[in-house]
Image (tube, rainbow, N blue to C red):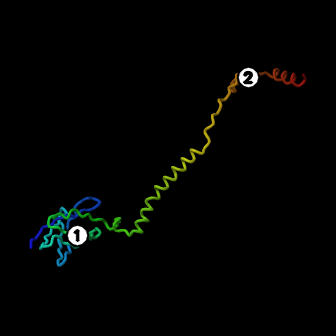
Amino acid sequence: MAAINYIGRVLDREKQAPISGAKVSINLPGSLLVVYSDLEGIYKFQVPFDDRNVLEGEITIEAKGYKTYSSFIRLLPDDRDIGDIRLVYPHYVSPHNVQPHAQEVENQDNLLPILAAIMVVLALIVAALTLPPPQETPPLETPDNLINLQQVLPLSVNSVYEGLTSSIFY
């Protein structure tokens, strides 16, 4: 029976920073191993292998301020790197942990702004196609004799009287 060393790393999913002091529990048939991640987020454990070519179990990682991670694990004698496991904050909702119905509702909520934008664009296109074409306005005619209203008119009382009497009596 040979003992094989495995290695893995625990990271913060959002910051991509290592998480030190995370409790890593590996539950295999007949044994439970508990180790802790170091300052670089790295954890190591040793598993005794007999004549089997694969060991299957569950890995659980707990760290203060993060959701507990739990997953199926398959250990092979030739693949000794568990890889990176990224922990999330308690408020984080992973699409893998959501029930199918709730995930469908979430996807519909994401589609609402897209559908609203498409509707606005279609309304603008329809409005542009149904509006009458712009009418050309003919140029304004300019009279030949322009009157300057700010200019003083040379009128006298006699000229106004003569103009009025001539138009009334003749």
- Locate residue 54, reporting x and y percent: 17, 70
Residue to which mark 1 is pinned: 73
Q: Secondary structure at mark 2?
A: loop
- Locate residue 57, reporting x and y percent: 22, 73
Dot 1 amino acid type: Ile
Location of residue 105 by image quarter:
bottom left
Location of residue 29 by image quarter:
bottom left
Residue name at image x 22 percent, y 69 percent: 73
Q: Nearer the viewer, residue 83 or 139?
A: 83
Cβ atoms under marks 1 and 2 closer than 8 Å? no
Q: Quadrant of the C terminus?
A: top right
Residue name at image x 20 percent, y 68 percent: 21
Mark 1 or mark 2, whichever is nearer to me: 1
Q: Give the Cα separation between the discs numbered 1 and 2.
A: 106 Å
Dot 2 amino acid type: Leu
- Locate residue 68, reporting x and y percent: 28, 70
Q: Quadrant of the N terminus?
A: bottom left
128 versus 93 height, above or below = above
Residue to which mark 2 is pinned: 153
